[in-house]
Image (tube, helix red, strand yellow):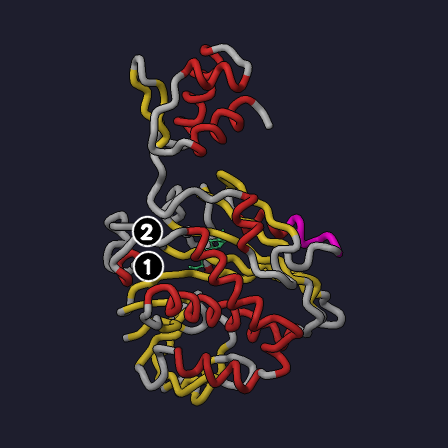
Amino acid sequence: MNTKEQVLQMLKQHAGVFLSGNALSQSLQITRAAVWKAVRSLREEGYQIEAVTNRGYCLAEPEGGFLEEESLKAAMPNGRLCRRLILLKQVDSTNSYAKKLAEQPDSDGTVVVAETQTQGKGRMYRHFYSPLREGVYFSVVLRPDIHLDELNLLTLTAALSVVEAAEALTGTRPKIKWPNDVVWNGKKLCGILTESSVESETGRVQYTVSGIGINVNNRSFPDELQQTACSLWQIGGRTFSRQQVIVTVLGRLERLLADDWFLRHREEMLAEYREDVALIGKEIDLIYPREKVHGRALGIDAKGGLLVRTETRGDTVIYSGEVSVR
Ligand code: BTN
């Protein structure tokens, strides 16, 4: 542990109360100048540390608490997920980070969590808003023994795990906007981006990285998201421990993935998913790169595709793409 991490650890142990510069320097055996340097650098990372003459330093505990690697590891579900947990203060995108690890044959079950993302990725090359310590941003690496055809089911499974977790945490069950946005009152609570590598000749999936971003304690959003985004705080009317949110989602996901439950019980999984989908029966637009096609969402097929009755293309099934409700 370097000096900065040692100072942070002590401040966290005394979060909310003042710790004198003297006490810090003596117990860590470093100069007071070194303590101050570490504090400045921690502030630059977004930690709120108050410095008051003759009292010392006081670290404000963020709403929803800190994420700590050891305590997160201890709280994680036992099983396939979280064999390896990586907690990052800041990263461009947990998906990009996890994809590099996913190449390694022993990476199944690895989870990468970040406190903030500078280039959080959404579907269709969109940006995912990832403010420091307000939401949770994590990616799950799997090396499942599945075919390309079954990939969609895995994506739906991730959405289901978030819906179940959100219900367990808030008492309110949000909806799914096909394929895998989780929404409440039409506003997005969670976005999921699954990226994968597939062997072209055989269609066998080499790895998948499912990135989950949930708005947790956000009280408000930037103007451009104000009408379209919501948070657990807004649903439940209280602050949520971000650790508990991560652990609850991973616990549900673990159950759905254990022994490939989502494949062996695909009808059960799909039945649950269909109950949660918000679009069925609605007039929608299918958004293709160069055109919009109007239709009515009829249902979800056995592979997780969206069945749509369109004016121009008849009945069609789409497995990827963007849909908007009219
Ligand atoms: C979407 O809204 O279209 C999907 C958003 C997915 C966001 C998550 S946050 C964790 C992971 N890392 C990323 O860069 N994206 C996903």
Answer with the quarter of the image where residue 283 lies: bottom left
The three-letter code of the residue at mark 1 reads Leu
Q: Position of residue 119 (x, y in %)?
A: 46, 45
Graded by Cα atoms within 10 Å as few (under 14), some (14 to 19) or many (20 or more), the crowding at tag 2 reads many
Number of other residues with Cα within 10 Å of mark 1, as a class: few under 14, some 14 to 19, many 20 or more: many
Q: Is residue 192 left or right of residue 57?
A: right
Of the residues shown, which amino acid type is indicated by label 2? Asn
The tag on residue 324 is none
- Which of 313/303 is in front? 303
Task: Mark 1 and mark 2 in contact? Answer it, CB < 8 Å.
Answer: yes
What's the residue at 31%, 82% (across, down)?
Answer: 282
- 126 in relation to 2, above or below: below
Instruction: Report the Cα–Cα distance between label 1 and label 2.
Output: 6 Å
Query: Camera-side residue: 295 or 174?
Result: 174
- Per the image, the residue denoted by label 2 is 217
First to last magenta residue range: 100-105
Q: Which quadrant of the structure image shows residue 258?
A: bottom right
Left or right relative to 209: residue 16: left
Q: Earlier in the sequence, mark 1 or mark 2?
A: 2
Quarter occupied by residue 32:
top left
Would you name the residue on which mark 1 appears? 232
Residue at 45% x, 41% y is 118
Which residue is located at x 47 percent, y 20 percent? 38
Q: Looking at the figure, which quarter contains the N terminus?
A: top right
Residue 145, position as x, y percentages in the image: 71, 70
Q: Position of residue 39 (x, y in %)?
A: 42, 22
- Side (left or right) of 280 relative to 237: right
Q: Is residue 36 above or below residue 65?
A: above
Q: Is residue 182 magenta?
A: no
